[in-house]
Amino acid sequence: MPLPQSESFTQISSDLFSQILLLTAPTLRTLTVVIRTARISGILECIAHTAMHDLTDLTLSFNPTRIVVPLDPASRNPPRANLPRLRNLHIDTCHVFSSTVAPAVALITAHAPRLVTLHVSDVLLMPGCAAVLARMLGRLPLRDSYGWVVPEDVLDSTARLPFTVREFALQVRDWPLTFVPELALIEVMASMDYGDGFVLLPPTPRRTYRHWKEGWLARVARRSLEEI
């Protein structure tokens, strides 16, 4: 479900997406959203607040789109199980983990009581990302060699992953500006046996829309075979 690439289409894209989603929501089982606009808002809220009772697999790629994510969605929007059968969530983004990915995950998981697998790919790291990741996993943050301490209000606003999540795979974007100290902390976290299913995967090449389309068609075909 691609969106237009011009910023002048941002609002109409959001409205059109909402209308399409409302029409297809009752029958959706697999949904892949690939967003390629300069800046867009409301898409994540639209997905989280639309009842899709049969949806089991959700993939969101907003890379490199600037996505506006509410920082504290739970307090303004009491969670409802709009995605009661969602089991697999994949978020692909070239945004900072702590400021964009964590709130986006919290927004979706608040409505997905049966989520089992979370995959975050192509993510960027800045100071404090490892601590936010630790809080999501229910672990105590590790202190890096520079003594970086994340403010308590930042950690307090980080939602813990649902206990239903059995695998959390993280892939960091492979580029020269990767913040090495944070990556080192996450590597240490991945080596610890906490039994929370967290794994750090090798970076993967950035995918184009063609690759996302091929993956989506493959999932649709697999779903069709399962129904035979």
Image: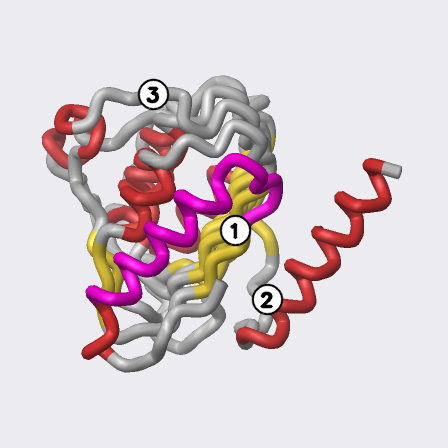
Q: Nearer the viewer, mark 2 or mark 3?
A: 3
**Which residue position holds label 1?**
59
Nearer to me, 148 or 162: 162
Q: Horizontal and vertical percent for residue 220?
A: 71, 52
Residue 17 seen from this side: yes
**Which residue position holds label 2?**
212
Q: Residue at x 31, y 36 (%)?
A: 107
Q: Where does the magenta region start and end? A: 11-31
Residue reaching furthest bottom? 6
User: Amino acid under label 1?
Assistant: Thr
Q: How is the image coloured?
A: secondary structure
User: Amino acid under label 2?
Assistant: Trp
Q: CA distance from mark 2 to mark 3?
A: 29 Å
Q: CA distance from mark 1 to mark 2?
A: 9 Å
Q: CA distance from mark 3 to mark 1?
A: 20 Å
Q: Is the C-beta separation of discs 1 and 2 under 8 Å?
A: yes
* Chain-order first, disc 3 or disc 1: 1
How many labels, in total? 3
Residue reaching furthest right? 228
Q: Horizontal and vertical percent for residue 90?
A: 52, 48
**Which residue position holds label 3?**
80
Q: Residue at x 29, y 28 (%)?
A: 159
* Chain-order first, disc 2 or disc 3: 3
Q: Going by the image, does 214 lie left or right of 75? A: right
Nearer to me, 128 or 89: 89
